[in-house]
Image: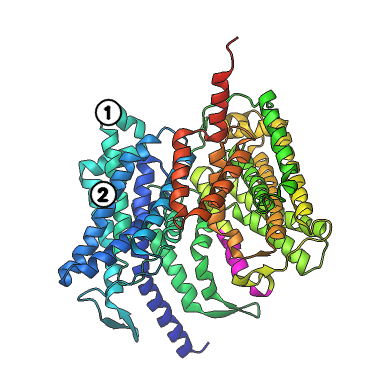
Amino acid sequence: MNPKEARVALDALAFQMINGLASASGLFFVAAGLSIIFGVTRIVNMAHGAFYMLGLYLAVTLSDHLPGSLGYWGGLLLAALAIGLLGAAVEVLLLRRIYRVPELYQLVATFALALILNDAALWLWGPEDLLGPRAPGLKGSIELIGRRLPEYDVFLAFAGPAVLLALHLLMKRTRFGRTVRAATQDREMVAALGINEALLFTAVFALGAFLAGLGGALQTAREPANLNLDLTVLGDAFVVVVIGGMGSISGAYLAAVLVALVKALCIALGTVEIAGLAFNMSKLTLVAEFLVMALVLVLRPQGLFGRPQAVPARAAASEAPLRPSGGTGRAFALAALVLALAVPALATVWAYAPVLALDMLVAVTFAASLHLLMGPGGMASFGHAAYFGLGAYGTALAATGLGLPTLPAFAVGILAAGAEALLFGWFCVRLEGVYLAMLTLAFAQIVWSVVFQWEEVTGGSNGLIGIWPDWPFDSRTGLHLAALAVTLAGLYLIRRLIFAPFGHALRAGRDARMRAEASGIDVARIRWLAFTASGMLAGAAGGLYAFAKGSISPETLAVGRSIDALVMVLLGGLAGPTGPVLGAGAFTLLQDTVMRETDYWRALLGALILALVLLFPGGIAGGLSRLFAGRRPAR
């Protein structure tokens, strides 16, 4: 590269970095609100991205209807204030009812709320994107390094540090801020000192929602409002919070800037040669933040400005030892097996029965694989779809590209998923809590990016087609019976693992890691083996999915599928191996039934999930156990 080309490249890099600060500010607002809410309430708010989305929709609507410059800027502020009030209402009406349930069930409840809010936006504004007006007084551009930079982007680049300074003063100089910081460090002590905890939680949730709404409102002049923003922004915000360190507002801003600068660097570099091969660095923008997060979590698990993780002596209250199902449980299992075997016969009167049953079997296998991690292992995964998708793609490529018969192709898919779980699990199992969950998400997004962009092998966004099984699995009956056999084998394997010494050691590491290690149990190795086994079972579910649908796409590995698995496991319950079976069956049936009944199926599904969480905080299996326990005659 000659000096002139080098100068042009440096100018492009500097311009992209300055432009990236505008994106960093919007992301910082959302991440700061998420960090404040989690720090005080300990709730992983899956609806936080919906607050951002609604803030943008409201700002577009208000700025169009309020007159003049004051109306535009007033509309942005009113939109943020309205979202803050919505956050307060959500905390009072919903979250106060679930503070005492396990944290993962709180996650499911806020995910259900996100579904409801998404369909509320669909009902109010329709499915089309909404374009907002340009900001009065900031419609022009300025010349910078020989290029034109929008004035509004310059304004946003300064807005982030201004809000950071305001939050710093709020937290350091006010009684409210000191209370928030104290609650972040020791929530129980704050309650013991007589501070109104309910009012504090409401105020904190309102502040976090206000920041998310403000972040969305300020994007009015930069991007259209659309219904896909909630999950996209939520994922980016989680990344920023984890990189910066949970509870650190300044860390959130610096992490947002770091992510923006890394993306800018990728864009500025363009196509580079690595070992004689041309590589388009701009493709990394799809996954740059997850690469940064994975690197940070591997090297510094607590984030850049977070406190080191303390391994608790007891991670949770000890549970009663698992016992094999009694007569009632065995009767239900036998009835379910008979019904599953009768599905091909039911097809004569209900043609859709085999399709629905096959979807349920895939969902049960997938949910059971995640339950092995979350239940006995105590490890939450936000990226379990990676192993499901790798199993699907491994099976599809073996069947179509290599021409292997059905069973060997299926085995290739399972081995591909297991190999990746073995690799990723080595890093993941050394972390705890939300950091472990976020590292699984980072690895999953990296895999998704590779699948999405490696068009020569995976077909890119078009995916792969023509994935059909050979005889005797090429009929509905044959494929259904094969899927049933795989599901039963997977459930049997999980049951054997749970009741074996391996399962007891896994639960010991979950309930009291320090005590288990002092007893001579290699907790990290046990968790790693469980992670690998879980990935292989998820790969088996993915292989079944590929043969059932005949085609796959990158959506197979998307975040939404991981969230579906989480919801299925938590709806069923974590206490016993029957939980994922009940949860996956109920979720698949609800999703299929609701989707066909209304355009607003997300809201109805979300309402049903909320009802289940409120009525059965221990999941469906836990609720049924209490119900039958109450009916047993006293001895």
Crowd rating for badge 1 (residues with CA inside 10 Å; few <14, some 14–19, many 20+): few
Q: Please name the residue that numbered disc 2 is placed on.
A: 85
Front residue of 84/357: it is 357
Q: CA distance from mark 1 to mark 2?
A: 27 Å
* Vertical arrangement, residue 253 with respect to residue 582, above or below: below
Residue 491 visible here: no
What residue span does the magenta drawing correspond to? 445-456
Q: Is the C terminus in the top left, top right, bottom left or bottom right quadrant?
A: top right
What secondary structure is marked by label 1?
loop
Identify the amino acid type marked 1.
Answer: Leu
* Vertical arrangement, residue 512 with respect to residue 33, above or below: above
Residue 166 image point, x, y percent: 23, 55
Residue 105 image point, x, y percent: 48, 39
Q: In terms of secondary structure, what is the magenta stretch mainly? A: helix
Q: Residue at x 38, y 78 (%)?
A: 15
Side of 410 relative to 514 (left or right)? right
Residue 122 image point, x, y percent: 39, 60
Q: Residue at x 27, y 51 (%)?
A: 84
Front residue of 105/439: it is 105
Identify the amino acid type marked 2.
Answer: Leu
Q: Residue at x 32, y 67 (%)?
A: 219
- Please, which colouring scheme is shown? rainbow
Question: Magenta span has 99?
Answer: no
Q: Please name the residue that numbered disc 1 is placed on.
A: 193
Residue 80 visible here: yes
What secondary structure is marked by label 2?
helix
Q: Residue furthest top?
A: 635
Residue 9 image point, x, y percent: 45, 83
Side of 452 relative to 162 (left or right)? right
